[in-house]
Every structure is written in C-alpha cells, then in structure tokens.
Image (spheres, rainbow, N blue to C red):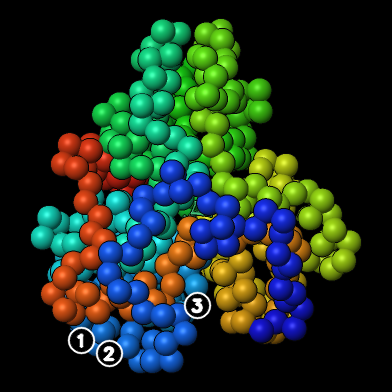
Amino acid sequence: MSATFTEPTASPLLHLLGQGVDLASERGVECTGELPSPSDPTLVERARAAREALGDRAFVLGHHYQRDEVIAFADVTGDSFKLAREAAARPDAEFIIFCGVHFMAESADILTSDAQRVILPDLAAGCSMADMARINQVDEAWDVLVEAGVADRTVPVTYMNSSAAIKAFTGRHGGTVCTSSNAQVALRWAFDQVGGTHGDGKVFFLPDQHLGRNTAVRELGLSLEDCVVFDPRRPGGGVSAEELRRARMILWRGHCSVHGRFSVRNVEEIRAKVPGVNVLVHPECTHDVVSAADLVGSTEFIVRALEASEPGSAWAIGTELNLVRRLAHRFPDRQVHYLDSTVCICSTMNRIDLPHLVWAMESLVAGRVPNQIVVDADDAHWARVALDQMLALPGI
Ligand code: 13P
Ligand code: SF4
C-alpha cells in the first residue's frame, strides 16, 4: 500500500452494515437461505469451487466500490456505465451476478434478454440517493411543470442511480439516462431536443442535484442562476411558476450522503499538507468541492487517472473508501491520500460481502435462483427506451 495512505477514522455518522440505516428504504433485509459465517475459514475455497462449477453459465460484475474479497471474484470491474455495457454484451451468460447496488442490477435486467437472470447477492444493497426520488413524487413534479407551462419544452434526464420506474418515466417523456461518465454528452443531447443551451428549453435532472449542477455549470457553460432546486417535500417543489419558467436546469433535491461529506476545507487542508497534490473527486461531490478540485470524474475515470499517473505523484481522492484503499494498494509508488480523514463508507455497497456471494453462487450451483431482480414489463420497456438512448449518444 502507498506509504502515505492513512486509514480514515470512524466518523460519528458511520453507517456500518445496517447500523443507522433506514430499513424502510431498503429493498429487503433478509437472506432467504443459510448464509455462510464470515469466519468460515473455507469461504474463499467455497467461492472458488462454486465459481468454477458455474463456469461460463455465470458472469460476475463488480462495481469499483465493492469490497476486495468480492472484487477478487469479479470477471469485470467498472463504473455503472461500463457495467451496464458489459451486462448487455454477455448474451450467452445464463446468470449475471451483479456485485453492486439495486438500480445497477435493474438496469442489467432491462438490458439483458428474458432468458438471462440477474442476481443481486444481497437485496438490501440499495442506494440512498436513488431512494430520494420515488415515482409518485416525480409524476407529481411533472404535473407542476405542466401547470407552469414549461413541460413541453423540458427534457427529463435521470442519473443511472434511480429506480427502473424513474428511468421508464424519462423514456415515456422523450428523455434519457446518464451516468457520471457521460453526463455532459447526455445533457447536450437533451438541450438539443429543445433548441440548444442558448434557447429557453430546460432539463429536468433527477435525482442528483450535484451531478446535474456540476455538469451544467462546469461543462455546458450555464450559470448557477440558471439552476433551480425542486424539493419534492415542499408544495409545488418550493419553486414558483416564474422561477421554473426562467430556469434552464430543474434539479431534483437528491444527493449522495457519502460524497456529500467531502468539503472545501478537506481540499484546503490536503493542499497545505501535501504540496503539488492532485485533488481528484467524483462529480457527486458538491459544486464548491468540485470547483476546488483539479480533476473530476466517474469511478472508472478515477482508476484510469491513477493508471496514467507518474510514479512519485501525489493524489487526494474524494470518493468511496474501498476504491481509494485499493488504489493505494495497487500504486505503492504514488502518494495516495483519502480526501477526508473521517468519512463513511457506502454502507449499501458494502452489504455485498463474501458470505452473500458464496451463498448466491452455491445456490445457483444447487439449481436455485436466489435474489433475482425482475423489472415489470411496462417499466422495462420504457426504461429500455431511455437506456438505449443513452447507449446511442454520440462519442461514448
Ligand atoms: P460511477 O458511475 O462513477 O461508478 O458512480 C456510481 C455511484 O454510485 C457513485 O456513487
Ligand atoms: Fe448511492 Fe452514494 Fe452509495 Fe453511490 S456512493 S451507491 S450514490 S449511496
């Protein structure tokens, strides 16, 4: 591991494997079978044997935030965009085992054939940001835009981190999906549908206000004043019809609680401590943090930036801890720092551990299909329209 990597200390808000998690927002909390004990000394051996027995029948996808013990069994690792593409490119795999979170597994189900089964090893692996936009709230918000007379010149764009129902909403309303690696292209495409960035067309961006704002302001040349925040908990979203008419970006009030913890103070402190450090953050960070950073990009971008970096270079990375710790291990000749000294992990990503993966794979070997993710046919159709639109965007 990079000699400079210091393990962050537990934050007071630590969300550790179920502690402090809102169970009502989770997709399920029970494992429906006999979960191996985490202390089982044969766990790695069992995982190897089950993986071998499944062979080409299964394909294992691992998001960059997964634990090392899980990544060790991934056939491919990536950001949410790369994993969606990889799932779509494996028509021969009977089982797609998705080591990531629920919305990613839903997208894989939509992009694969009906004969293929997508398995999420722990159904409690949700995403708190995706849970911040419920379909009934989004339908009501659209009614507000209709009332304000702006819906006919508004294109919805939803971040991949959203439920299939919300992706279907964007498909039904002529919009698209985006990820952190193609948000700029997706937003340009959306504005082009309503007269370009200089007209009075609008984008309704869900559910991450930060990714929407960061992309619009930093990459499309819009201003902060062009953005309004629609709060689903306030009547009319807390914005007037006049504000909606003036806005170019209507941002849903959602955020990631992991990335929301990085601050400008963290950036200033690391710059003072490590002269010449490159500050590299995920675009789910707040606008002031992203503005203070040197580089901004998806998890795959972060991995590639480290791969392309010079030995001896110094990096402070603002994203989930598993990925940063792994990069510090992989590049011991770079200085790799965690941007915050006390930050929480993504508790839901971490729910998928080796016992759950072993349980899922052994169940498949025994002829049982555990934790299959199935999107209902109508949502799947319209979500696919929006996802195909994303996959067809130019230059991605
Ligand atoms: P990426 O698309 O960059 O992998 O991000 C997904 C995510 O959930 C980040 O919090
Ligand atoms: Fe969701 Fe944030 Fe976890 Fe990503 S890091 S899966 S946005 S809660």
Mark 2: secondary structure: helix
The percent position of residue 302, horizontal first and vertical second, equals: 57, 64
Instruction: Determine if residue 175 is in view.
Output: no
Image location (x, y in percent) of residue 50? 26, 84
Q: Residue furthest right?
A: 272
- Left or right: 342 with respect to 82? right
The residue pinned by badge 3 equals 68
Image-based side of 73 in relation to 344, left or right:
left
For the N terminus, give its image quadrant. bottom right
Q: Position of residue 343 (x, y in %)?
A: 68, 59
Q: Amino acid at mark 1?
A: Ala
**Residue at 60% across, 48% down:** 257
- The residue at which mark 2 appears reads as 49
Pointers 1 and 3 in contact (C-beta within 8 Å): no
How far across and down, in percent of the image, does residue 107 sit?
A: 30, 51
**Residue found at the very far left of the displayed protein:** 115
Q: Which residue is mark 1?
A: 53
| Disc assigned to residue 2 | none
Question: Decide: marks 2, 3 in contact (CB < 8 A)?
Answer: no
Q: Residue drawn 27% across and 83% down?
A: 51
Q: Earlier in the sequence, mark 1 or mark 3?
A: 1
Contact between marks 1 and 2 (CB within 8 A): the answer is yes
First in residue order: circle 2 vs circle 3: 2
Badge 3: how crowded within 10 Å, few (<14), some, or many (20+)? some
Tell me which amino acid carries mark 2: Ala
Q: Amino acid at mark 3?
A: Asp
User: How far, Cα to Cα, is label 1 from label 2?
Assistant: 6 Å
Judged left or right of residue 226, residue 366 is left
Mark 1 lies on a secondary structure that is helix
Task: For ligand 1, tell me if the residue under mark 2 lies within 8 Å.
Answer: no
106 w.r.t. 74: above or below: above
